Image (spheres, grey):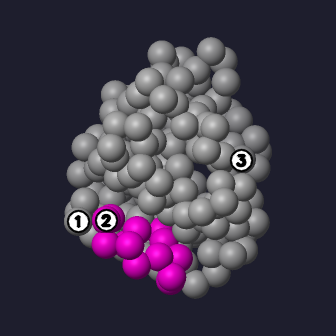
Amino acid sequence: MTTNICGVLLAAGYATRFGEQKLLYTLPNGVKIIEAAAKTLKTAIPRCTAVVRNDSDEITKILIDEGYDIVVNPNSQTGMGSSIKCGISSSIADAWVIALADMPYIQIQTIIKIKDLLEQGEKIVVPSYKQQHGHPVGFDLTNKNQLLKLNDAFGAKHLLNSNINLVKTFEIDDPGIIQDIDRKQDIIISN
């Protein structure tokens, strides 16, 4: 049974399509994108690490205020895989729930369900909304070496595809798992 679970929030991206630092953009509800994503993950998993760039002081301060351990990715320009490696290697855990900082609409119960399935012994846990896989994704300790060997430019999709027999997918009524914010028009006005 897995009980030592760490949330890993990936917040080291460059937001090139958004036109400005999107994680600091304020949503219609008055909360910054980074705050919304950070609060949700931290509420579901009390022990969390955030991976940031070395030039993101304001984001880092927000995450520290939210109670996150901070890891700076010195190679953030190389891509998501390098951030995953930083987050995993910096936290001692039996499992990780890897979340993206530009996905502020994920519901707390989704992350709790991922955590519960990891605690029950699942190896890889992926939420699904209307049969579309989403985030965050949970990995247990048996996946650590493969996570640390990820290609810097890519996330863990290859790991999921090559270990499909270990993946536990569950359907949940949470459109937030597939709603990342890449452009300003991705922001949901009614939320």
Q: Earlier in the sequence, mark 3 or mark 1?
A: 1
Q: What's the amino acid at mark 2?
A: Ile
Residue designated by label 1: 65
* Mark 3 crowdedness (10 Å alpha carbons): few <14, some 14-19, many ≥20: few
- Nearest-to-viewer mark from 3 and 1: 1
Q: How many marks?
A: 3
Residue designated by label 2: 62
Q: In the displayed structure, would residue 44 be above or below residue 85?
A: above
| Residue 24 image offset from top left, x and y in percent | 45, 59
Check whether the beta carbons of the residues at disc 2 and disc 1 lie within 8 A of each other. Answer: yes
* Mark 2 crowdedness (10 Å alpha carbons): few <14, some 14-19, many ≥20: some
> Circle 2 — which element?
helix
Residue at the image position 25 percent from the left and 60 percent from the top: 66
Residue 45 among magenta residues = no
> Circle 1 — which element?
helix
Residue 96: assigned label: none
Residue at the image position 44 percent from the left and 24 percent from the top: 190
- Nearest-to-viewer mark from 3 and 2: 2
Q: In the displayed structure, would residue 174 be above or below residue 12?
A: above
Q: What's the amino acid at mark 1?
A: Asp
Residue 157: assigned label: 3
Of 54 and 23, nearer the camera is 23
| Residue 76 image offset from top left, x and y in percent | 62, 75
**Which segment did they paint magenta?**
51-63
Instruction: Compute the Cα span from label 3 to label 1.
Output: 31 Å
Instruction: Compute the Cα span from label 2 to label 1.
Output: 5 Å
Q: Earlier in the sequence, mark 3 or mark 2?
A: 2
The quadrant of the picture occupied by the C terminus is: top left
| Residue 13 image offset from top left, x and y in percent | 60, 65
